[in-house]
Image (spheres, rainbow, N blue to C red):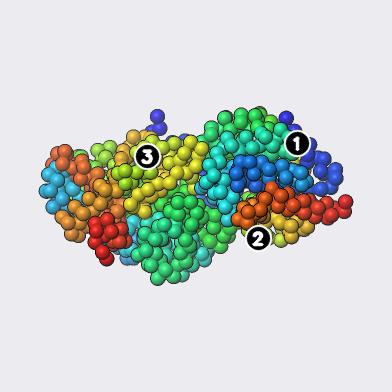
Amino acid sequence: MIELQKGIPLIDQHDEHGYWGGKFGGSQIAESLNYPIEELTREFEKLRHDEKFIAERDHYFKNFVGAPTPFIKLNNLTKYLGGAQIYCKLVSKATGGAHKAYNAVVHALIAKHLGKTFIGGDTGAGYAGKMLSMVSAHFGLKAKIFMGAKDIERQQINVFSMRSYGAEVVPVTSGSQTLVNAVSECMRWWTAENETAHMCVGSTVGPTIFVKICAWSTAQISREMKKQVIDEFGEIPKNMKLINCVGGGSSAAGFWNEWMDHDNVELIGVEAGGPEDSKKHAAPLTNSSKLGVLHGSTQYVIQDSDGEIEETESISAGLDYPGVSPLHCFLKETGRARYTSATDEEAIEAFKLVSRLEGFVSPSLEPAHAFAEAIKIAPNLSKDTIICVDSCGDSAKDAQIIAQRLGYKL
Amino acid sequence: MSSDTLKQKFSELKKEGLPALLTYTVGGDPSKDISLEIFKSIAESGADIIECGLGHSANIGDGAAIQDSTYRALSNGIQTDDVFSIIKSFKNEYSQDVIIMTYQNKIMSYGEKNFIEKCVASNVSGIICVDYPWPTNMSFADECKKNNITFIQLLSPTTSEERLKLILDDSHDVCYYISQLSTTGSKLKVSSEEILNKFNLMKSIAPEKNFIIGFGITLDTIQSIKDVDAIVVGSALCKEISRSVNESQNPATNIGNMVKQLKEKLTALIGF
């Protein structure tokens, strides 16, 4: 049985080769990437303990990203469901509309520190690409964003933002033309350009160092939230559940980070269950997919019997990924977090209900999956149970998809 | 005894003063039957060692030409066992050594032990696994060695001298030097001098080992690096398969002609 260790940051609980629990993660990369990854690993370890660097990070998080984001009670939803009290961490209020700003800021700061002039990144829903483009414009870095052609089509609002910030958006037309292909293409590009370019992996996936940088960045969410929870309740509630959607897993890793050692806080991850009548779910943890190597790390991967990555299907571009962070594989294996899935239909219903009842909260299709789980479980829970949902993205980017679903014309 | 034949091939060629000519094509591209014909045609055209790609859709090291070949094979339903059966049929008739080049998930999914057993049964001489770096590949590499299969370690221009020594120390008879920082099929962007300097450095550390040089090698670039142990031509061949398929020509004949030209050029350079 693999065990979680207390008092040690989750991102540091890997072995000397970068594996959590001895089997998740690692750096399964081509030899050409060994040097830049070793360089990045060495530099990041120095920077994360460097007070000046931390001050710079905090300056950007506070003044540019807008930390802390609100922590609010959803009174109407609580009353409507009639069980647990429902709270929301409104991470979608971060500049740019999602948690991806944290990782982008940190990567841009690292790129500057390393003296790199180019930065490349992958994107699925377009948030990671949008934020990377945004911070690159600020820091004077040339950004190149790799995005599946299908995702470009369905997330045009974010693509428009990226181009406005001066980034080059590279359409990836191989395979399923979604995030999985975009990440592969971005890694190929970095293999050729790593002497002058830095790579930002948009989630807690990829070789170990990228998992660590991303989770270290998004940890801002739970760091500020812990204070907000204590302000609200005077203490840490005896019975609290934190619900977060999981695609690659970057927002969940950040939303949960500070709560790892609090056993009375239950961590619930919600994967994409896809359309009700489809079997192509993007839910490797829920469906106990086989262990495999994808994008340089070992994780549970949706694949066929011959090791080929299978296509997934989800209404949410941000969750439409066949693999999942090694951190979440580890949290599942240790029993610290539990994982489930919500269907496209449940996510749409959750979006409708939350938007109609709450007004201030209008989750994008990714956190709509997390709300769907909250809506499922809240009515059967006691009134002293606190549910907190991470609303990590704003629905504006999904306006076209949702309108089409609901029969409106935009 | 597969790894012995590979070693023997290198020493034979060395006596002749020729670098070994390796060809890379994707197993099963464009179909199982034609792929086997391509291998036969390559062998008859003078290639010394056959590198056979076991394609993976989420590859992170291949450029457009090899990706096209890979997707064509996969979308035609080619599976790992099909590639093994192509190699086995080839080896029934031809003596050239076959090296499999693949990605870790293909081996992991098949099971490392099963994969090695199947390599033995299909007469495979060596394995290159792009995303299975040293030192995490050591137990797999040891298992290969026990079964007389050469696990070919990869080295790159940015591999430090210290790491180079450690890898060479653990490596088998043959290593693969990635000549430049790029995916496969890119134009050669480093000078032949740089490649030769690195080759000489590796040779000085491990004189008894054979180094294959790959990436950016075409008819035009062959001349300047003829002094190495072996060179690989891959993307140019995959591109030719794509062209032949698109123009409804016989890829086996066209690839055969291309390999013949490469071999003739190499032989001419040495002055035969």
Residue for badge 3: A285
Residue for badge 1: B95
Of badges 3 and 1, nearer the viewer stands: 1
Observer-nearest of A72 and A370 = A370
Using the image, determine if residue B10 lies above or below residue A120: above
Q: Secondary structure at mark 2?
A: loop
User: Left or right of B8: which side holds B153?
Assistant: left
Residue for badge 2: B187
> Which x, y percent locates residue A34?
57, 49
Q: Do the residues indicated by labels 2 and 1 lie within the same chain of the protein?
A: yes
Quarter residue B197 falls in: bottom right
Dot label at residue B186: none
Say which residue appears at 51% left-offset and 64% top-offset. Answer: A118
Say which residue appears at 18% left-offset and 42% top-offset. Answer: A378
Query: Disc 2 residue type?
Result: Lys
Tell me whether the residue at label 3 lies in contact with that at label 2, contact meaning CB atoms closer than 8 angstroms: no
Query: Disc 1 residue type?
Result: Ser
Q: Secondary structure at mark 1?
A: loop
What separation in Å lies between label 3 and label 1 (alpha carbons)? 47 Å
Tell me whether the residue at label 2 lies in contact with that at label 1, contact meaning CB atoms closer than 8 angstroms: no
Say which residue appears at 45% left-offset and 37% top-offset. Answer: A291
**If the image is split into quadrants, where does the N terminus of chain B sit?**
top right
Using the image, determine if residue A241 lies above or below residue A405: above
Judged from this view, the residue extending furthest toward the right is: B272
Chain letter of the residue beneath label 2 in the structure image = B
Chain letter of the residue beneath label 1 in the structure image = B
